[in-house]
Amino acid sequence: MSDRLSVVVVEQDRERALLIVDSLRDAGDFDIHVISEQTGLARRISERDPDVVLIDIANPSRDTLEELTLASSPLERPVAMFVDRSEANLTKAAIEAGVSAYVVDGMRADRLKPVLDAAVARFHMFRQMRTELATTKRALEERKVIDRAKGLLMKARGLDEDEAYALLRKTAMDQGRKVADVAEALVTAAGLLS
């Protein structure tokens, strides 16, 4: 993200939208765009590709909440949602949908910047966690495939585990491939032959 955050404000009421824009301008140097109509919201947000989406809803329903969170792509960018009132299950639904900040009791100018900062920080923290989780899952899957390939080599060639791994590693080096890729090819070929 650049130093100047681009913010899309989703607000149907013109007066409330103007208050939000004024509050943002008072809080810092933002590139602000207001979307007042929810029709085609996902497309409009995608076209703007903002750093942050700020949604202001007086009284959200579960359907409205789900529609807004899907449209604002909370896994792609931080989303801060301000609501006048809410129920516990709506708060939980918003957080599960990926909303970075869900603020009940409406939007107030004095807390807008800290909430946006918290939403951005929380978004980055969760994105890092998702990346680490995906990397860990991929490593675990690769480990499983390598173990299966070693087992196949041990059985077919009468090798011990270290020798089977050494053979996989040597083959990978000779072919300029990853050990996991060679293991995957071996497991796939063995599956075709059995």
Image (cartoon, grey):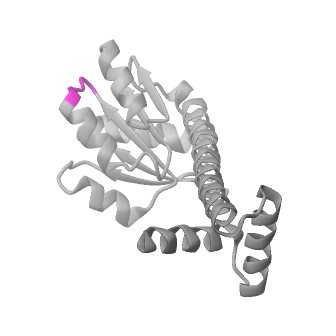
* Number of numbered discs on residues: 0
Q: Which of these two is toward me, 23 or 107?
A: 107
Instruction: Inspect this view and state whether residue 1 appears.
Output: no
Q: Which residues are magenta?
A: 58-62
Q: Which of these two is toward me, 74 or 178?
A: 178
Give residue 110's quadrant in the image.
top right
Residue drawn at point x = 60 percent, y = 44 percent: 133
**Image location (x, y in percent) of residue 166:** 81, 68
Work out which quarter of the rendered image holds the C terminus and state it: bottom left
Q: Which of these two is toward me, 87 or 93?
A: 93
Is 169 displayed left or right of 133 in the figure? right
Q: Which of these two is toward me, 62 or 45?
A: 62
**Image location (x, y in percent) of residue 49:** 44, 62
**Image location (x, y in percent) of residue 113:** 58, 35
Give residue 26's quadrant in the image.
top right
Name the residue at the front extreme: 158
Does 60 lie within the magenta span? yes
Residue drawn at point x = 57 percent, y = 50 percent: 134
Q: Is 99 rendered above or below residue 173? A: above
Does 68 lie within the magenta span? no
Work out which quarter of the rendered image holds the N terminus and state it: bottom right
Residue drawn at point x = 24 percent, y = 23 percent: 59
Instruction: Inspect this view and state whether residue 34 appears.
Output: yes
